[in-house]
């Protein structure tokens, strides 16, 4: 584990072996970060966040409470997570600030293994981003994104399929296939069954 001297790591945090935390990162208490991760400069990780092994969290990323990130996820620079759809700062009579602790309005978000979230994305609350899904830069995610789906825009919409190696399954395709069919990755040869937003990778034979 390598932690830059300007990083703030609060007590009660668990950081795995081989993980590097860069300058001016702030990791709140009760967070768990797995092995062999990179946490980029000036990123903020709130309390109670779970991050799996082999994740890359680039610079200026904000990860709020109630977010779980599985292994092998890439989150590019400037991405912001949220956890409340209807937030307020104060009570209606302006007599006191509302607490920031999780409550019944706090909605968890799950980023499944192998997913990529592009630079400057905003991730809504109460969502699941599927295994090996890819979110294009600058997107605003307001709905779940299924496994192996490429989603872009504001709001983000599915426009194609992505292999687990990161390449589009059908280069140049900007629509989903309605009829069930088989596809092979032109880059690594992995085989898939696809239909609409349903994608299933065939098991590889050793």
Image (tube, rainbow, N blue to C red):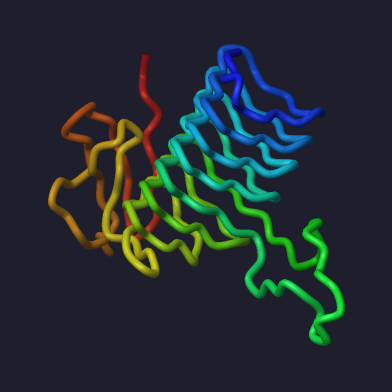
**Residue 94: quarter of image:** bottom right
Q: Which quarter of the figure is the N terminus placed in? A: top right
Left or right: where 180 falls relative to 71: left
Which residue is drawn at the image coordinates 36% and 47% (left, top)?
A: 119
Q: Is residue 75 above or below residue 158?
A: above
Q: Outermost residue toward the bottom?
A: 93
In the rendered image, residue 96, in percent from the top left (x then y), is placed at 85, 74
Q: How many marks?
A: 0
Q: Outermost residue toward the right?
A: 95
Pick the front one: 1 or 111: 1
In the rendered image, residue 159, in percent from the top left (x then y), is placed at 27, 60
In the rendered image, residue 204, in percent from the top left (x then y), is placed at 36, 24
Left or right: where 112 falls relative to 168: right
In the rendered image, residue 186, in percent from the top left (x then y), is placed at 16, 34
Pick the front one: 60 or 32: 60
**Residue 50: quarter of image:** top right
Which residue is drawn at the image coordinates 54% and 19% (left, top)?
A: 20
Pick the front one: 105 or 62: 62
Q: Which quarter of the figure is the C terminus placed in? A: top left
Left or right: where 107 falls relative to 120: right
Left or right: where 47 falls relative to 204: right
Q: Outermost residue toward the left?
A: 172
Which residue is drawn at the image coordinates 59% and 59% (left, top)?
A: 82
Which residue is drawn at the image coordinates 57% and 36% (left, top)?
A: 70
Q: Is residue 182 above or below residue 38?
A: below
């Amino acid at each position: 584990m390598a932690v830059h001297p300007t990083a703030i790591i609060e007590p009660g945090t668990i950081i795995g072996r081989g993980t590097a935390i860069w300058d001016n990162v702030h990791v709140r208490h009760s967070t768990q970060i797995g092995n062999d991760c990179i946490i980029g400069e000036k990123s903020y990780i709130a309390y109670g966040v779970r991050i799996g092994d082999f994740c890359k969290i680039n610079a200026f990323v904000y990860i709020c409470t109630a977010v779980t990130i599985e292994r092998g996820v890439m989150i590019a620079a400037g991405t912001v997570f949220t956890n409340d759809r209807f937030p307020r700062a104060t009570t209606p009579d302006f007599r006191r600030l509302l607490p920031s602790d999780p409550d019944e309005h706090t909605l968890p978000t799950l980023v499944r293994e192998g997913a990529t979230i592009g630079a400057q994305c905003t991730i809504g609350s109460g969502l699941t981003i599927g295994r090996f899904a890819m979110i294009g830069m600058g997107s605003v995610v307001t709905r779940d994104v299924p496994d192996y789906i490429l989603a872009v825009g504001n709001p983000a919409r599915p426009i194609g399929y992505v292999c687990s190696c990161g390449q589009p399954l059908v280069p140049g395709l900007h629509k989903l296939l309605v009829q069930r069919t088989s596809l092979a990755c032109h880059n690594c040869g992995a085989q898939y069954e696809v239909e609409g937003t349903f994608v299933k990778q065939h098991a590889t034979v050793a």
